[in-house]
Image (tube, coloured by chain):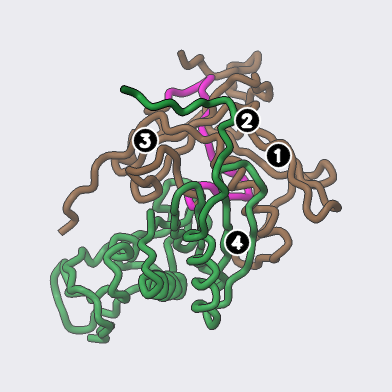
Chain colours: A green, B brown
Amino acid sequence: MNQKTNQGALYWIPVITRNRGDDCLYIDELPGFLVPFTAPTANDELAELVLLSDNWDGQGAPAPKTGSLEFASQILKAGREYGLQPLSVSPSAIGGVGITYAAGTREVFVEARNVGRIYSLFSEANGDDPEFLRVEIGEINEYFNRVSQYLHADPIAPVYDNICFESIT
Amino acid sequence: MAQSPKVDDSGKRIPDKRFEPDEQLFRRFMRQAMSPTRPYIDLSAISLPDLSVNRSKYSRASDVVDDFPDFGVAAFLVSEIPPSQVYRGTTQFEFRAVHKPLKKNYAHSEVQCFRNGEHFSWSRDDIDDEVEEMHYRWRYRLQQVLKVVIGPPEPRDSF
């Protein structure tokens, strides 16, 4: 049996869920309906996404491909090295994996696409246009330097000129 | 309350081209696309070209998740569709709801993109950075108006 031997947890999954394109396991020796599968990443957030098949949303969404899962894994790992925990990790309706980081009123969305590209959006809840950028996986540390600075920067303090703070006794 | 499909004189179902501004459009999203700490869903649940939705004139929100137990439903009004997106001051893309009934889902509709009045679509496998910038910015604007109307179920133990 060709086995993926990365450092993931060992899961038992139904064979039928692995029957898709380049993500399928090659089962040469094991009979039966279950095969041991080592998730291709060490990220628990991605474990469920690995199991998705094409059209997982009933609206034609492609399943995340191996490449986008690997990019997502690298993004999550790099984020953790910067002390960033994702707010959410979800399959993308356009094919790939979407990851959101947030702090205060600021968010950074980064999407590893099945087409091998990574795009990111930096946004703030004040209604300004978000900043869009393409991310190169080889420059992931530079990217997270920027993400970290963006999320940890002190937001501009709101001015409440119509509020009078008084002590309550 | 959902209405019966529109039919022609022969009784054949036909698309209802008219959308009222206050009609809701329902979009299902997977559980992972919503964090319990914030009331809105991820950009990853929004896709172009041709965002699939159900229109409230002909369906209920719960119809969208009938066969999708791990999903929730978000909604937005027709009037909330970001109507256009300018890219670097030049190319303007327009967006509007189009009724696209399916055999088993008369309420199915799409939010489609138009450029110079023509339906504009693109391949998800052959992408262009300029189109993608427009795409992400529009998705972000739609994300800001989406409201969760049916929350996704709690996660289950998968194994």
Which residue bears the numbered disc 3?
A: B65
Label 2: chain letter: B
Say what secondary structure mark 3 lies in: helix
> The residue under label 4 is which amino acid type?
Arg
Q: Is residue A133 left or right of residue A87?
A: right
Label 3: chain letter: B
Magenta residues, start to end: B44-60
Q: Earlier in the sequence, mark 2 or mark 3?
A: 3
Which residue bears the numbered disc 4?
A: B124
How far apart, in angstroms, are the residues tagged by discs 3 and 4? 25 Å
Q: Nearer the viewer, mark 1 or mark 2?
A: 2
Q: Which mark is residue B80?
A: 2
> The residue under label 2 is which amino acid type?
Glu
Q: Nearer the viewer, mark 4 or mark 1?
A: 1
The picture places residue B18, in percent across and down from the top left corner, at 68, 21
Q: Which quadrant: the C terminus of chain A?
A: top left
Q: Earlier in the sequence, mark 2 or mark 4?
A: 2
Say what secondary structure mark 4 lies in: loop
Which residue bears the numbered disc 1?
A: B95
Q: Earlier in the sequence, mark 1 or mark 3?
A: 3
Q: Earlier in the sequence, mark 1 or mark 2?
A: 2
The picture places residue B37, in percent across and down from the top left corner, at 35, 43
Q: Is residue B158 among the parts visible in the rendering? A: yes
Cβ–Cβ under 8 Å for marks 3 and 4? no
Q: Which quadrant: the N terminus of chain A?
A: bottom left
Label 4 packing within 10 angstroms: few (<14), some (14-19), many (20+): some
Label 3 packing within 10 angstroms: few (<14), some (14-19), many (20+): many
